[in-house]
C-alpha cells in the first residue's frame, strides 16, 4: 500500500534526530552570510590568565610614578596623532577611489574588459563599414 512507504529523506516516527543548538548553528553558519564571524580563540600560555594579567597591569599603572606616567602618556598621545593622520589619509584615498569609480561608467574591476569590448567593436564596425563601402563602390 502507498501509505506504508516512508520517504528516504524523512526519519521514521520512532527515530527522532536531535541536534544541539550549537551543532545547528555550526551547520547553518556557512549558509547564513549575515551570521557574525567569531573571533579566533586566544590560547593561554598557562602561566597567568588574561584577566589576572589585565588586573596586574592596571595596578602597576595606578602605582606608577607621575613622571613616568606622563612620559608614557606623551608616547600614547603622539601615537594617537600618528594614527589619526594615517586614518585621515586612508579615508581620503577611499573617498577619492569611490569618486573615480562613480564617475566612470563601468566598475573599476572590469575597465580592461570593457575597453577590450569597445576596441573589438570599433575594429569590427570599421571593417564592416569598409566592406559596405567597397560593395557600394564596386
Image: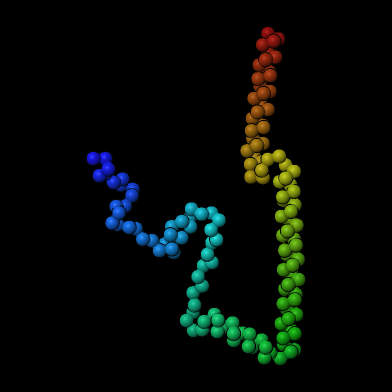
Picture layout, residue 85 above or below residue 121: below
Classify residue 128 by image quadrant.
Answer: top right
- Residue 20 coordinates in the image, percent (x, y): 40, 63
**In the image, residue 116 above or below residue 63:** above
> How was the colour assigned to the protein in this rendering?
rainbow
| Camera-nearest residue between 31 and 131 | 31
Instruction: Report whether 16 appears left or right of 1.
Output: right
- Residue at point 75%, 52% (across, down): 96
- Give the x, y percent position of residue 63: 67, 91
- Is the C terminus in the top left, top right, bottom left or bottom right quadrant? top right
Residue 123, quarter of the rendered image: top right
Q: Where 118 sits versus 61, above or below?
A: above
Residue shown at 54%/80% (left/top)? 50
Q: Residue at x 68, y 27 (%)?
A: 122
Image side of residue 116 versus residue 66, left or right: left
Left-right relation of 53 to 90 = left
Identify the image quadrant of residue 3: top left
* Residue 14, percent from left and from top: 28, 56
Report the front residue among 21 and 90: 21
Q: Is residue 109 above or below residue 55?
A: above
In the rendered image, residue 32, in percent from the top left (x then y), is placed at 51, 54
The quarter in which the N terminus is drawn is top left
Q: Nearer the viewer, residue 122 or 95?
A: 95
Q: Which residue occupies the extreme top position in the image?
A: 138
Amino acid at each position: 500500500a502507498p501509505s506504508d512507504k516512508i520517504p528516504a529523506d524523512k526519519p521514521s516516527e520512532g527515530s527522532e534526530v536531535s541536534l544541539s543548538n550549537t551543532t545547528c548553528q555550526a551547520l547553518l553558519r556557512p549558509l547564513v552570510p549575515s551570521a557574525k564571524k567569531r573571533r579566533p580563540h586566544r590560547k593561554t600560555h598557562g602561566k597567568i590568565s588574561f584577566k589576572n594579567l589585565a588586573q596586574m597591569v592596571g595596578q602597576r599603572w595606578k602605582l606608577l610614578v607621575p613622571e613616568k606616567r606622563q612620559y608614557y602618556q606623551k608616547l600614547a598621545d603622539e601615537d594617537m596623532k600618528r594614527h589619526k593622520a594615517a586614518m585621515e589619509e586612508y579615508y581620503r584615498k577611499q573617498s577619492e577611489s569611490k569618486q573615480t569609480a562613480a564617475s566612470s561608467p563601468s566598475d573599476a574591476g572590469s575597465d580592461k574588459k570593457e575597453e577590450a569590448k569597445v576596441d573589438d567593436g570599433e575594429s569590427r564596425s570599421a571593417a564592416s563599414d569598409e566592406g559596405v563601402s567597397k560593395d557600394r563602390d564596386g
